[in-house]
Image (tube, rainbow, N blue to C red):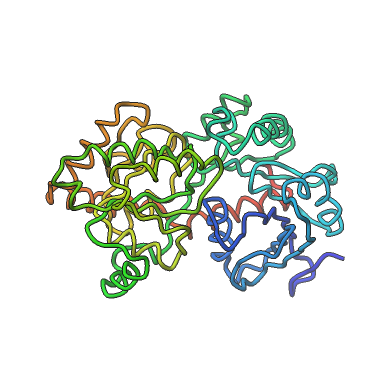
Amino acid sequence: MRGYTGNWLEKVMQIGVDARSLLPMRTGIGTYLVEILQHLSPTDTRGCFRLFSHRPVDIPAVPLVKTHIHPARWGLAWYLFQSWRSINSVELDLFWGVQGLMPFGLRRQLPVVVTIPDCVHRMGVGYAPSALYNYLHRLLLPVSVRRAQKILTISRFVAGEIHQYYDVPLNQIEVISPGVSDHFFRSNIREEKTQAVLEKYRILRPFIMAVGTLEPRKNLRTLLQAFAILPLDLRGVYHLVLAGKMGWHSESLEIDLRSHPLCSRIIRTGYISAHDLPHLYAGADMLVFPSLYEGFGFPALEAMAAGCPVIASSTSGLGELVGSAGILVDPYGPVLEWARAIEKVARSSSLRDELIKKGISRTREYRWSVCARTTVDLLYHIAGGGNS
């Protein structure tokens, strides 16, 4: 039986959610989902969010959220071919596919909204975890697109890709920009805590920072090569900090790291928690983000909020996000251009100050409260039978 609020005429809507991304070591889509859920207003009694996953989810206690856990070894296989049994057992008003794909077997009359954070599967095997990943997304994402009442995405760049690749009318795509959490803002970061975090990871200033899963798409080879050809005086002063867990096809990166001429000045921290990460940004002289493809680019936004100058790829969603608030470089261009950009920031305190000021100003456009409110309003609107 459906729930009702104090007024028996007001139906409490039930929103089902793909919650597989809510892991202890979250990446972009997990951050996106947990922030939206955490920003649910406890006074908003329009509905309840029901999270479906194959393993326990890592999320603080949030009102109006219930979890449905059905243990399985392989998350994607469970989601595509088995989760429908659990989902259909709850009388939902809408299902939200946060990672683009939809389970087989959902009730035909159940409204669906999908978030497509990127179209990296269209870029080739070198950009995505595997040929199987590319194949499944190329095969199944069009099915999700046709099934969805509305498609959400996180940047105009990805909206253009969805329109181009899947012939989706632009009025069916809603661009809702993510935000940056308050604890990343420079005004909330204390120097004494920053120093303690740097000591925890044995990081010495000054240092250049890269953040993200260590995988081919992040284009870290370009950063390593640029670091190796910096002028001699900078090579003798700077460390390079790589913050992120090892990802797919990381074997060649391991070889590059071991054979790097400055390997003794390269620090790998592994995955950094959301509590420590702002302090690494605040302690760094710059973030260098040479990724070949990003639907959005959370590390760039977080770094700018923390007052860290950003050098980023000019392509994909990064160019749109950073704009004139950072230095943009072609990730397919000469390595020398990356080295020159690093040198400029390293040598010019006035340039660093300018980038810090522009970056902090830029981040004011991105708020999780706005993202959450806009997303939740749209989901409830469609769940309640409103036109998409």
Q: How many marks?
A: 0
Q: Give the vertical position of 32 relative to 167 (above or below).
A: below
Quarter of the figure with residue 23: bottom right
Q: Residue at x 66, y 43 (%)?
A: 114
Which of these two is toward me, 184 or 378? 184
Which of these two is toward me, 193 or 169? 193
- Give how far across and how far down residue 288 sits, in percent: 32, 45
- Give how far across and how far down residue 54 sits, in percent: 74, 57
Q: Residue furthest front?
A: 259
- Give how far across and how far down residue 185 sits, in percent: 34, 63
Q: Give the vertical position of 91 relative to 330 (above or below).
A: below
Relative side of 57 to 238, left or right: right
Tell me the quarter of the image containing the N terminus. bottom right
Which of these two is toward me, 120 or 336? 336
Quarter of the figure with residue 207: bottom left
Tell me the quarter of the image containing the C terminus. top right
Mark yes or no: residue 259 visible: yes
- Give how far across and how far down residue 210 sits, in percent: 36, 49
Mark yes or no: residue 361 visible: no
Relative side of 142 to 252, left or right: right
Q: Residue at x 15, y 42 (%)?
A: 232
Q: Residue at x 51, y 30 (%)?
A: 160
